[in-house]
Amino acid sequence: MKEHEIPSGANRKKRCIGRGEGNGHGKTSGRGHKGAGARAGYSLRAGFEGGQMPLFRKLPQRGFNRKRFQSPCAIVNLNDLEKLKTDKVDITSLKEVGLIRSNSTHVKLLGTGKVTKALVVSVDQISKSAKDKIIAAGGSVSE
């Protein structure tokens, strides 16, 4: 669609606020009288009901979510291990190369990719396919 093909009325002019009484949006500029909504920088929190007890606090909690209790785990694939200069794979060597963040505490090794050299792997968790590929390439795994 080109600019001349846009139907008329599709683009409205911006509403002019606070420019006198004549345009219908003067004086309080559509903000009513006093209160937080009339102030600059005011934004209403989602679910706020004007001080009344909000619905989400009235309703009981249902179910269970394990995300609250999980510890975050950095993910590394086998094809990423080609960046390593040594054959030793552990959390410190992965941090040095930049495959995981410096504040990571747990690492899981996944089996996406191929292993070309014998690796000595010691990580927190490892998938079965990754373990099989490393052992088949002549490496060793210790968790």
Image (cartoon, grey):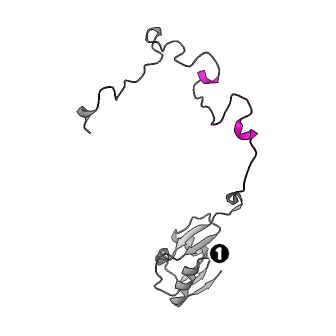
Image quarter of the N terminus: top left
Q: Which residue is mark 1?
A: 124
Q: Residues within 10 Å of mark 1 (few under 14, many from 20)?
A: some
Under mark 1, the amino acid is: Asp
Of 56 and 102, nearer the camera is 56
Report the residue at 61% width, 24% height from top: 37
Residue 119, quarter of the rendered image: bottom right
Secondary structure category for the residue under label 1: loop
In the displayed structure, 5 sits above or below 67; it is: above
Q: Is residue 45 magenta?
A: yes
Q: Is residue 57 magenta?
A: yes
Of 126 and 98, nearer the camera is 126
Of 82 and 34, nearer the camera is 34
**Where does residue 3 sit, x and y in percent of width and height?**
26, 34
Image quarter of the C terminus: bottom right
Magenta part mainly helix, strand or loop? Answer: loop
**Where does residue 93 sit, x and y in percent of width and height?**
56, 75
Report the residue at 50% width, 77% height from top: 78
Of 3 and 135, nearer the camera is 3
Residue 71, quarter of the rendered image: bottom right
List the single residue furthest toward the bottom: 138
In the displayed structure, 16 sits above or below 51; it is: above
**Where does residue 51 sit, x and y in percent of width and height?**
72, 29
Number of numbered labels in the structure image: 1
Residue range corresponding to the magenta coloring: 35-62
**Does residue 8 appear anywhere in the picture?**
yes
**Where does residue 48 sit, x and y in percent of width and height?**
67, 33
